[in-house]
Amino acid sequence: MPPSIPKKIVIASRESALALWQAEFIKRWLIELYPQSEISILGMTTRGDQILNISLSKIGGKGLFIKELEQSMAEGRADIAVHSMKDLPMNMPPGFALAAIAEREDPRDAFVSNHHKSLDALPAGSVVGTSSLRRESQLRARFPYLQVQPLRGNVQTRLRKLDEGQYAAIILAAAGLKRLGLADRITTVLSPELSLPAVGQGALGIECLSERTDLIELMKPLHHIKTGQCVESERAMSRELGGSCQVPLGGFAEIIERKLVLRGFVASPDGSRMLSAELSGNPASGETMGIRLAKDLKAQGADEILDALK
């Protein structure tokens, strides 16, 4: 029997413009699926949004963006939460479930600059802003003559800091810029070979209480199978490596000619050491592939890098 459709479904969301866009996107989809239900959004400011003068890796990681949203579900004030998959910790906390992963937007990083066409075109000593150890390690490895400086805040704040001349260029997720109608700010999109994306980048996840089997069933139409296979593969790799935003690692899977191709890397923060690996196989075995790729990286010495970071 199909689950009964609740009279109301409340979506918990951060209050940044991008997070609200994502919540509105899911809201519109749910309205089409379940017009008999009243769908609303509960906007919240999280601790991760409040602390902007310290890098995420030093204050507890991206989990700071979801704790308040999970609390609202635990207290019954919200039914589901919409997250950027790259913000979700690799292990779901007890009592919560990932109900669906929506189809992925562009997963790549974007180079944004007002005066330079590419990373290669930046003069020595140019300041590049990023909030990510993953991006920072890759930049330092490939462009050691550039200065990499922290960059926090929502998308608009980061663009404003670029426009004020605080940075020669900044690196952002292409998906966020496209979703906010800011694709024209992208100077160039960086290939995965140049900047391997973050685990889950570009994909949206829908979280709910694990006991809400009715909601889990109702969210099934929003789940995109291929995106789910890719993201779960990436997350399995990161989970096996103990990945978080305190660890400079990237993981990116895509399905090419019916095969899942997974790439991953672990690096030292200064980019002096970078280990990478790649696997391809059956998309249905993505999670197993993620674990295998992590073990390949460990065999190359990833544990030494990770232990040093602890």
Image (cartoon, grey):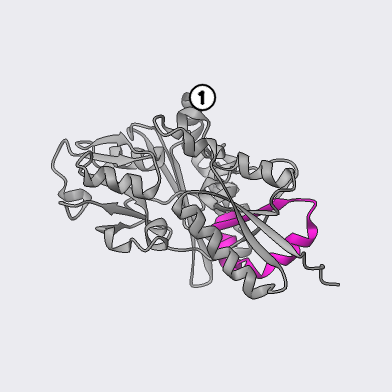
**Position of residue 284 in the picture relative to residue 194 (left or right):** right
**Who's the residue at 18% across and 49% down the image?**
120
Q: Residue 43 magenta-drawn? A: no
Q: Residue 226 magenta-drawn? A: yes
Residue 92 visible to the viewer? no
**Horizontal and vertical percent position of residue 101:** 60, 60
**Horizontal and vertical percent position of residue 309:** 47, 26
Is residue 237 depicted above or below 176 in this figure? above
In the image shown, does 133 or 296 lie closer to the viewer? 133
In the image shown, does 306 or 1 lie closer to the viewer? 1
Is residue 271 depicted above or below 7 in this figure? above
Number of on-image labels:
1
How crowded is the residue under tag 1: few (<14 C-alpha within 10 Å), some, or many (20+)? few
**Position of residue 266 in the picture relative to residue 63 (left or right):** left
**Who's the residue at 64% across and 68% down the image?**
30
Q: Amino acid at mark 1?
A: Lys
Q: Residue furthest right?
A: 1
**Horizontal and vertical percent position of residue 137:** 35, 38
**Position of residue 292 in the picture relative to residue 55 (left or right):** right
Is residue 71 depicted above or below 190 in this figure? above
Quadrant of residue 240 in the image? top right
Q: Quadrant of the N terminus?
A: bottom right
Quadrant of residue 152 in the image? top left
Residue 121 visible to the viewer? yes
In the image shown, does 172 or 184 lie closer to the viewer? 184
Q: Residue furthest left?
A: 123
Identify residue for label 1: 310
**Who's the residue at 27% across and 42% down the image?**
161
**Horizontal and vertical percent position of residue 249:** 45, 41
Residue segment shown in magenta: 204-232
Q: Describe the element under mark 1 as helix, strand or loop.
A: loop
